[in-house]
Amino acid sequence: MKILIAIDGSRASLGTLHFAAQFVQRAGEPPTILCVIERESDQRSKQAEDTFNTARDILAVPEIETMLRTGHPVQEIVRETESCKFDLLIIGEMRSNFLTQIFKGPPAARIAACTPCPVVIAKGDRRPIKRILLCDSGSGRSEALNRFTARLGKMLEGEEDITVLHVMSQISAGPGVKGGQLRASADELIQEHTPEGVLLERDLQALDQPGVHPTPKVRHGLVVDEIIKETRSGGYDLVIIGAHQGEKWRQLLLDNLAVEILKRVDRPVLVVK
Amino acid sequence: MEHKPSSPTPGQNPAEIIDSFPVTSDLSVEAEPRLRWWKHIKLAKIGLFILSLYLFILAITLMKTGARGLTPFLSDLGILSNPANSLGFGWLFAYLIMSGSPVAAAALTFFDAGVVNEISAFTMITGSRLGASFIVLFIGFIYVLRGRDRATSLSMGILSLTVTATTYFPGLLIGIYLLNTGAVDDIQLHTGALLSSVTGTLVEPIAGLLMGIFPFWAVFLIGLGIILVSFNLFDKCLPQMSLKESRVGWVSRLVYRPVVMFFLGALVTMISMSVSVSLSLLIPLSQRGFVRRENVIPYIMGANITTFIDTLLAAVLLDNPATFTIVLVSMLSTAAASILILVFFYRPYLKSSLLFVGWVTSSSRNLAIFMITIFIIPIILILI
């Protein structure tokens, strides 16, 4: 797997590199470190060179490729991934000014929206990945989510517990509707072969491989709120979500829940495309 | 099995309404051969639509004349002497006849006859909408009495009433400001006089006959009865939508931007003219009759604005520019309150509304408190 790690040379980048080390050591190919600096100067170039040397030490791989770009970080990172050479992009939690955050959203979310490859945003509490939360909405990205998560399981060391979460935010649309499923657990939904049950069962089958221990879970409530509650109560090390659906009309009509989750989750997030 | 969507209509027997709601979850899907669009047009429905429109015009004419005769009686009774009274009166009246539109039309005819002033007519219309939002809750309540699950049966009704109350009350303040300042007085439809003369010619023979036989108060009540029948017939004109999961089921599965659901609710209600009908149309959208929590609230907000469309038509038929202004203000103030919530407070509003619904349905005691409150408030308002 070809991995691109994008950093800006700051101290915060070190945390991103430590987290990325878990992925690159069994990736099979040398990672590429992209350092983007906003204004070129001798001091910054020197700082970048130091960052590359530190990256070699932290990642502990025999070989790394390095790239130095000058410009806007979001644009430069997206441009690099558009070459389609990479299977995974790892970035840190990037900062931007308040107004940009309000009108354009967080830089990490913008990168996740524009890059063609899956993106890990190493934010918040970064620990060795042992517990993974896979959020499956069942709206078209399930297959990609499962495929990538299974691949990820092989890359990571040891055994991982994966909780496959589906949030049912439905309520009955009218008084005469039978609502037993609106309170059912994952096991009950699987037994009853409801659409959510079928989805979870399919996810479990896709993730059934050595070293991976998947568990289905259903929560009832607002989608984003329930995902946030689960990430906090479950002590997960990585949250996996599908990207906002990008087809023309859907992008206009659908709410971008991926951005909401990215804004509010306090731990690393993998956005699968 | 093809599902015929339920449509609780004004004045409809509650038992009929209940039976029209889908009870089973197997609203199965059958493939239908594709027909040309003109083959979907049913002449009987067009006939029914013309009849319902005629009855609506006749009803407005009768209510307009009858209301003049009611003036001394209502003045003596003192239940419409201030805006708070008329808010409570409109609210309770809509409970009583299980519909808001006839009450809103009555408010306009009362204003036209001089029974109430501009602000009182506006608050009575607001009250009528609050009362109308009780319909879905009432149906759910009967389901609970029949032994159905409380949360499932009542959630949508309580949510509808909560959203309506929390948008109409701030809207009330905006509306009173707009009426007092006369900010929208200049916006008028100039076809009112022409339309009134044309429709007057059409309904005059029957209206004249009834007015010659019955006293004013009876003419008003006959008009009220006819308007209920006209809404009932209009609901029957709506296409029998066998909405298939394969065609539009996506509406129930995905989470839409609030603005999308807001406009969808407004559009569907503009056609159906009733919030309860447009809410019932959500049921067959998914095979199981479920809808996403995130989607419902903006849908109800949009529906609450265009539900005034029939009242707007009544205002045009009355050919009194001030009545048009009152309805326009009702629409604008509700829209302004809804947009403010959607833009600035949507997430906390969504969460607190759902929390409130959860609280009400969590115990019989809470439900009883809620039900008593929604009956006591309008009574207190009438007594102020």
Image: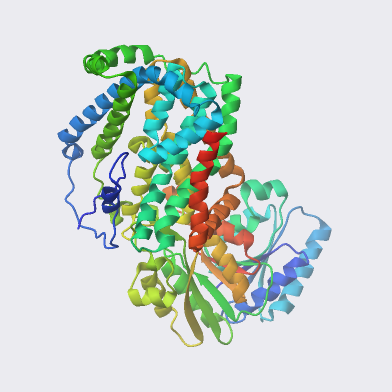
Q: Quadrant of residue B68?
A: top left
Near-viewer residue (B292 or A100): B292
Residue for point 39% across, 64% down: B149
Residue for point 63% across, 61% down: A264
Vertically, is B107 above or below A216? above
Vertically, is B171 above or below A36? above
**Percent from the top left, x then y, of residue B94?**
41, 37
Near-viewer residue (B90 or A233): B90
Q: Quadrant of residue B22?
A: bottom left
Q: Farthest residue in the front direction?
A: B76
Residue for point 18% across, 47% down: B34
On the question of residue A3 being in view, the answer is: no
Q: Farthest residue in the right direction?
A: A43
Left or right, residue A273 beside residue A21: left
**Percent from the top left, x then y, of residue B248?**
33, 51
**Percent from the top left, x then y, of residue A243?**
51, 61
Residue for point 80% across, 64% down: A47
Vertically, is A32 above or below B115? below
**Percent from the top left, x then y, of residue A224?**
55, 61
Which quadrant does the N terminus of chain A fall into?
Answer: bottom right
